Image: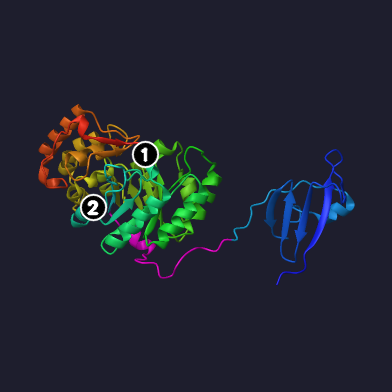
Amino acid sequence: MPGPMHAKFFRVTRESGSSRQNPNLFHGFSFRSHNSSILFLLGSRCELPLHYPYIYPQAHLRTGVWKSPEAAVAQNFHLPMRSLEVKNRTSVDDIKGLRLITAIKTPYLPDGRFDLEAYDALMNMQIMNGAQGVIVGGTTGEGHLMSWDEHIMLIGHTVNCFGSSIKVIGNTGSNSTREAIHASEQGFAVGMHAALHINPYYGKTSLQGMISHFETVLSMGPTIIYNVPSRTGQDIPPTVISKISGNPNMAGVKECVGNDRIREYVDGGMAIWSGNDDECHEARWAYGAVGVISVTSNLVPGLMYELMFKGKNTLLNSKVMPLIKWLFGEPNPIGLNTALAQLGVIRPVFRLPYVPLPIAKRIEFVRIVEGIGREHFVGDGDVEVLDDDEFVLVGRY
């Protein structure tokens, strides 16, 4: 049981910095037990452990000498929210061996909610064509347009329905460390095999801040770090990766800077996935990458499987290059969303701010499909151009 509580009332005089007890007029008071101190200042409340000597310096109240608080990193008193019986638990080494990981698309119903029937069909097509893992709720899956409730639900749904056939990697990264922790705890609790974490974007931090952020989230479970400076506005340099590479939960890096950076990491013994579909064939066979985390494999998973597993094939790589260039003519996932709608495997529904590619680009896509061969693409129906008025743009979802 806590020890007896007692109160101490005091007033701090700003001009002199002195402290004197005054039972009638005070700016703050504290209640203290043997194991904690609850400090009230001008209506604010905080609870602190007693080993912070400068937070509530009783000796200074007696002597009248006040010292400025010293900067300190608050200890983390939270126990990990984890289960030793997590469904489909996997090892870091299992993640390191995945060659083809698809950044899976999230399809929508006309009102903007998830179209789980279409999603399940997309998942089954990935599994049947050799994909070994999926990123759920990544940039391609529009995790940034989801609430966290939607996000974790989709991770859980994917694990529940497909977790025994494919590795489920949840994009639980955030530019807020607090949110990244919370989402990762929930993602692992519903059974995801690994997490994908990006460096804090927009509100960028220092290199030491990056290291602290990653060290915090790496404690949750197997993790792939994602470096895409074109989106975050900040590179994750090798010095940062080197600092966190020894963490037992560090599976590797999805690297978008280029193949020279990939080789640098591979020479150091790290598992690296290319994040650039147009460079992934060379990354795999000439620079030592494990494989690719791919957008294009949403459309032609069988061909991407060949590029990752069947040896160097410059002819096939050249064959799919027009498709890759078309896909990334506008920021991803605009091209992918348009293409999947034209193939008839998802409804032509876009969550704003994304809008479909213009009709000239849609006509070009039909020609690309014909050139590669419809049989290599997902779905069974004919590829269509679609009219502008067939697309649904949803702003409230």
218 relative to 129 in the view: left or right: right
| Three-letter amino acid code at the position of disc 2 | Glu
62 relative to 296 in the view: left or right: right
For the point 24% across and 45% down, which residue is it? 281
| Three-letter amino acid code at the position of disc 1 | Arg
Q: Earlier in the sequence, mark 2 or mark 1?
A: 2
Label 2 – label 1 distance at C-alpha: 21 Å
Q: Which residue is mark 2?
A: 117
Magenta stretch containing residue 83, yes or no? yes
Magenta residues span 78-99
> Where 383 falls versus 85 (above or below)?
above
384 relative to 203 in the view: left or right: left
Task: Looking at this view, name the residue that lies furthest to the bottom.
Answer: 1
Q: Position of residue 277 (x, y in %)?
A: 27, 42
Identify the disc placed on residue 396. 1
Q: Residues within 10 Å of mark 1 (few under 14, many from 20)?
A: few
